[in-house]
Image (cartoon, helix red, strand yellow):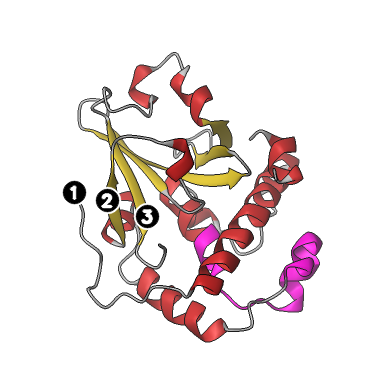
Amino acid sequence: MRSPALAGLFFSCAVAAADAPRLSASGQAYFRRFVEHFTPLVIRQERRGGRQNYRWDASNRDCAGLVRYVFHEALSRHSESFFAHYPDMARLGNYPGTGELATAARHWAQGNQTAPDLLRHARYLGREIELQNLKTGDILYYESSLWHIRHVMLVVRSGSTAFLVYHTGDQRDELRIRTIDDMRRQNEPQWHPNRENLVFRGIYRPSFLD
């Protein structure tokens, strides 16, 4: 079933540590539900202007910073001030087994500052995009010295649709959301998520997720 919030908005690498913990099935389900509910709220706040998102400061505003921010909140235990800022998240609430989320958060945060750092905390899935295999939390990576590109996009699913959410990472300071097909129709071929595009380096999945 498609998330109304998302639908309305339309919007080679090693694991960082061999002992990086994998979340339990219920922990992974909670993490992905959180990302699917929280991400459209982040975009909506941005569109209102004034950078109103809770705890996302100016020093962290780039493509990797968006992923770190969303993941940090998804792995955190939240106070009443968070739920006051995002009332819709109160229905999801805190995960009861927050100890495992905190452990995953500590591993995820270690030395995790740039787009390439994100990949060192993830495993490589390949360059062939099969929509049915994409999961919320997957990361698409683009890199080219010629185009001066190092860029990540976050996969957020809404039913059968996989959205790509990303920060432009430049002076425009914008959040954008597109479908895979929309990205493939872009006029700039370096952004096409196809194996024929050598700038597209592939799909990665965070080490704490199946």
Residue 41 versus residue 92: which sits nearer the camera? 92
Q: Which mark is residue 124?
A: 2
Q: Which mark is residue 12?
A: 1
Answer few, some or many: residues within 10 Å of disc 1's Cα (few below 14, many 20 plus, some between 14 and 19): few
Determine whether the residue tagged by mark 1 lies in a helix, strand or loop.
loop
Residue numbers of the magenta segment = 70-92
Q: Is residue 6 above or below residue 206?
A: above
Which residue was labeled with disc 3?
Answer: 205
Residue 99 image position (x, y, % from top left): 51, 86
Q: Is residue 28 above or below residue 100?
A: above
Image quarter where the N terminus lies is: top right
Answer few, some or many: residues within 10 Å of disc 3's Cα (few below 14, many 20 plus, some between 14 and 19): many
Circle 2/circle 3 CB separation < 8 Å: no
Q: What residue type is disc 1 on?
A: Ser
Q: Is residue 181 left or right of residue 30?
A: left
Residue 202 image position (x, y, % from top left): 30, 40
Answer few, some or many: residues within 10 Å of disc 2's Cα (few below 14, many 20 plus, some between 14 and 19): some
Image quarter where the C terminus lies is: bottom left
